[in-house]
Image (cartoon, rainbow, N blue to C red):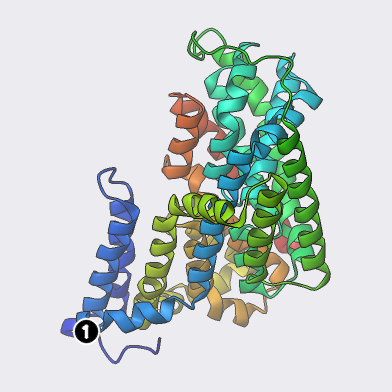
C-alpha cells in the first residue's frame, strides 16, 4: 500500500499504531476470538487511513494472494495432514516408536524421550499446539506411570516442542524467515534454527529435571490415568501407512532442498504426503479428501485470520506509522551500534509486537527495514533477530501457546512455566548479542 496522503482528522502518523495497540489489548481478553479481534483492528485501521469500508472487499481479495495468505493455507493443510496421520494410526505409531525406543523407565530418559517426540511431531505437522495435541494423550499415561509431574511435561512440550518449528524446512516460521531474508533453508538452519534450538534443548532438559524434583509430590496426574499396554502392536495397515508417510516426507523434503523449493512448495509437500499416506493406509481418494478436509476445518479460522492480517498490517504501513517510528528511533539506534540495534529490535518483537508469530515477523521486518539497509546488516543476523523477536513472545506472556500447552499437559503451575520462559529469553538474547559480533 502506498503512503497515506493524510489520516482522519489530520492526525499524526504515529496514531496509525492505534489498531496494533488495540489488537494487543484485545488479545488478552479471553472472551474475544482472535478472528474477531483482527476484524475489529482492520476496521479501526481502515477508518484511520480513510479507507472506504465498503471497499474493503477488494483489499481482502488482494490479500488472498499475499504471503500471509499462503502461510495460512500451509497451516491449514498441515492440520489436514495431521487428520490423516491420526485416522491411519501413524501418529500414535510414531509416538510409541520414539517413546519406547528411548525408554521411559527413569526421569532422565522420560524427559529426553518426550523432548524428542514433541520436537519431531511439531516439525512434521508445522504447528506447536497441533503436534503436542497429538502426543500428549499418548505420553501422559507413560509419564504418569513413573510419577512425572504435569509441570515437567508442560515445560517440555512448550520449550522443546517449539524447536521443531525452528528446524523444519517447511514450518511457518522457517518459511517466513527465508522469505524475509532471501536466505536458503540450509543457511537459516545453520545460522539461526540450530543455534537457537540447541540452547533451548539444553535449557529444557535441565529445567525439566529441576522442575520434576521441585514439583514431585505437589502436582500429579489424575489417579484414573492408566499406563498403556506394554505390548502395543500397530496393525499392518498402520505400519504400511507409517512407511508411506516417512518415505514420502523424506523424498519431498530432500527434493525441495535440492531444487530450492520456496514457500509454495510446502503446499505440494503436505498434499503429496497426505495422499501417499492415505493410499498406503488403504483409503480411497474420496476418503483421503474427506479426512484432509476434516483436519483443515479445525484451522480455517487461522487461514481467515492470516488473510485479514495482510490488510491490517497494510493499513498500519499506509498510515506512515512505521516510518515515523524509524525516524524517531534512528538517533538511538545509530548511537548504540549493531549490538544495540540487535537487542533493541529483538526486544521490540518479543515484548512490543504481539500477535500471530508469522505476522509479527512481517511487522518486525517492516518496522526496521530502513535501519537494516542503513546499517548494511548481514541477513544471517537479521534472520536470527526476526525468529527470536517473533517466537519469544509466547515465553514472555501467558498467552495462547503457553496456556494451551499447560492445558494439554494437565498443568496449573504457571509459575514454573513463566520461570522457564524468562530463562529461555535471557539465554537467547545472549546468543543474539554474541551473534552481533560474529555475523
Determine whether 398 is above or below 100 in the image: below
Residue 160 % position (x, y) = 65, 38
Please tell me which residue is depicted at 48% across the width and 44% down the height of the picture: 396
Please tell me which residue is depicted at 44% across the width and 62% down the height of the picture: 303
* Element on which disc 1 rests: loop
The C terminus is located in which quarter?
Answer: bottom right
Q: From the image, tell me which residue sits under label 1.
A: 52
Task: Count how many numbered circles sit on residues in the image.
Answer: 1
Residue 190 % position (x, y) = 79, 59
Determine whether 406 is above or below 326 in the image: above
Q: Residue 61 or 53: which is nearer the viewer?
A: 61
Left or right: where does residue 91 sit relative to residue 245?
left
Please tell me which residue is depicted at 20% across the width and 85% down the height of the picture: 10
Q: Residue 327 or 166: which is nearer the viewer?
A: 166
Q: Residue 362 or 351: which is nearer the viewer?
A: 362
- Whether residue 121 is visible here, answered yes or no, is yes
Q: Residue 37 or 78: which is nearer the viewer?
A: 78
Crowdedness near tag 1: few (<14), some (14–19) or many (≥20) residues, C-alpha within 10 Å: few
The N terminus is located in which quarter?
Answer: bottom left
- Whether residue 355 is visible here, answered yes or no, is no
Amino acid at each position: 500500500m502506498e503512503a497515506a496522503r493524510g489520516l482522519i482528522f489530520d492526525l499524526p502518523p504515529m496514531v496509525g499504531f492505534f489498531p496494533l495497540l488495540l489488537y494487543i489489548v484485545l488479545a488478552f481478553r479471553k472472551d474475544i476470538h482472535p478472528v474477531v479481534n483482527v476484524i475489529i483492528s482492520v476496521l479501526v485501521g481502515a477508518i484511520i487511513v480513510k479507507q472506504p469500508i465498503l471497499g474493503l472487499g477488494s483489499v481482502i481479495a488482494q490479500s488472498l494472494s499475499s504471503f500471509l495468505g499462503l502461510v495460512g493455507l500451509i497451516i491449514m493443510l498441515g492440520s489436514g495432514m495431521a487428520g490423516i496421520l491420526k485416522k491411519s494410526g501413524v501418529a500414535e505409531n510414531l509416538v510409541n516408536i520414539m517413546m519406547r525406543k528411548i525408554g521411559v523407565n527413569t526421569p532422565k530418559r522420560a524427559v529426553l524421550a518426550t523432548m524428542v517426540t514433541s520436537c519431531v511431531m511439531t516439525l512434521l505437522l508445522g504447528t506447536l499446539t497441533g503436534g503436542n495435541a497429538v502426543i500428549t494423550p499418548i505420553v501422559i499415561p507413560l509419564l504418569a506411570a513413573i510419577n512425572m509431574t504435569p509441570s515437567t511435561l508442560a515445560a517440555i512440550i512448550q520449550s522443546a516442542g517449539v524447536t521443531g518449528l525452528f528446524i523444519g524446512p517447511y514450518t511457518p516460521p522457517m518459511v517466513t524467515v527465508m522469505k524475509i531474508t532471501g536466505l536458503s533453508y540450509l543457511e537459516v538452519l545453520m545460522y539461526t534454527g540450530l543455534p537457537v534450538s540447541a540452547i533451548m534443548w539444553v535449557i529444557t532438559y535441565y529445567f525439566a529435571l529441576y522442575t520434576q524434583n521441585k514439583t514431585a509430590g505437589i502436582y500429579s496426574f489424575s489417579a484414573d490415568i492408566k499406563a498403556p499396554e506394554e505390548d502395543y502392536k500397530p496393525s499392518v495397515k498402520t505400519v504400511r501407512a507409517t512407511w508411506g508417510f516417512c518415505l514420502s516426507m523424506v523424498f519431498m523434503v530432500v527434493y525441495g532442498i535440492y531444487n530450492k523449493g520456496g514457500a509454495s512448495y510446502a503446499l505440494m509437500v503436505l498434499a503429496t504426503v497426505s495422499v501417499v499416506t492415505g493410499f498406503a493406509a488403504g483409503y480411497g481418494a474420496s476418503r483421503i479428501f474427506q479426512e484432509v478436509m476434516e483436519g483443515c476445518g479445525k484451522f480455517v479460522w487461522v487461514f481467515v485470520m492470516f488473510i485479514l492480517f495482510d490488510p491490517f498490517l497494510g493499513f498500519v504501513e499506509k498510515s506512515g506509522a512505521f516510518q515515523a517510528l524509524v525516524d524517531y528511533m534512528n538517533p538511538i539506534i545509530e548511537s548504540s551500534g549493531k549490538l544495540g540495534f540487535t537487542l533493541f529490535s529483538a526486544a521490540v518483537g518479543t515484548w512490543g509486537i504481539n500477535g500471530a508469530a508469522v505476522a509479527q515477523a512481517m511487522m518486525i521486518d517492516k518496522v526496521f527495514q530502513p535501519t537494516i539497509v542503513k546499517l548494511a546488516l548481514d541477513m544471517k543476523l537479521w534472520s536470527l533477530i526476526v525468529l527470536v523477536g517473533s517466537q519469544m513472545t509466547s515465553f514472555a506472556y501467558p498467552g495462547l501457546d503457553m496456556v494451551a500447552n499447560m492445558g494439554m499437559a494437565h498443568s496449573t503451575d504457571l509459575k514454573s512455566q513463566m520461570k522457564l520462559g524468562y530463562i529461555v529469553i535471557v539465554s537467547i538474547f545472549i546468543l543474539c548479542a554474541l551473534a552481533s559480533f560474529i555475523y
